[in-house]
Image (tube, grey):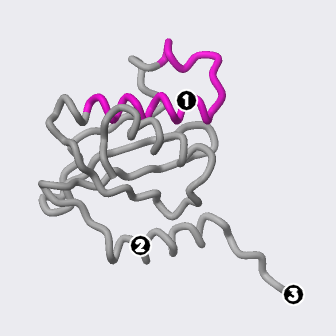
Amino acid sequence: MFKKEDKNNLRVIRHARVRKKISGTSDCPRLDVYRSNASIYAQIIDDSKGVTLLAVSSRDKDLESKLKGKTKTEQARIVGETIGEKALSAKIKNVVFDRGGYIYTGRVQALAEGARSAGLEF
C-alpha cells in the first residue's frame, strides 16, 4: 500500500528549506504568514533578536467589524493592509516576505498585495 503524503508536512519541509536562506534583521525584518482553514495570521519578526515586532490576524477584535461578511481572500487583503499600516507607523518600510511554505496564490497573495498597497516594500 502507498501512503498518502500529508500536505501540511510537505509545507513544513518547504518552509524549513526556505528559512535556511531567509531571515529578518533589524533593518529588514521578516513578514511571516500562517494560514489556517478559517483564519490568516501575519507577523513581522526580527530574527537577529528573536522577537516579534508586530502581529495581526483575522481573529483580532479591532478588525472584527471590517471583516464581517467578507470572503477569506478579502479578509486576507485587509489583514495585509493593516499590518502594512502598523509597520509604517513603527517605522518599518522594507521587509522580507516569508510565505511559510504556502503557494503564492489566493489568500497568501492577497495578504502580500494588501501589505504592498499600504506601503511596505518587498
> Dot 3, crowdedness within 10 Å: few (<14), some or many (≥20)?
few
- Residue 98 in percent (x, y) is at 40, 58
Position of residue 104 relative to residue 15, above or below, is: above
- Residue 70 in percent (x, y) is at 63, 22
The amino acid on which the numbered mark 3 sits, given as a three-letter code, is Met
Name the residue carrying label 3. Answer: 1
Mark nearest the camera among 2 and 3 is 2
The one nearer the camera, 1 or 91, is 91
- Spatial CA distance of label 1 from label 2 is 26 Å
State the quadrant of the N terminus: bottom right
Secondary structure mainly formed by the magenta segment: helix
Q: Which residue does the image show at 49% across and 17% down from the upper left? A: 64
Name the residue carrying label 2. Answer: 18
Q: Which residues are magenta?
A: 64-86
- Spatial CA distance of label 1 from label 3 is 41 Å
Which residue is the extreme one toward the bottom?
Answer: 1
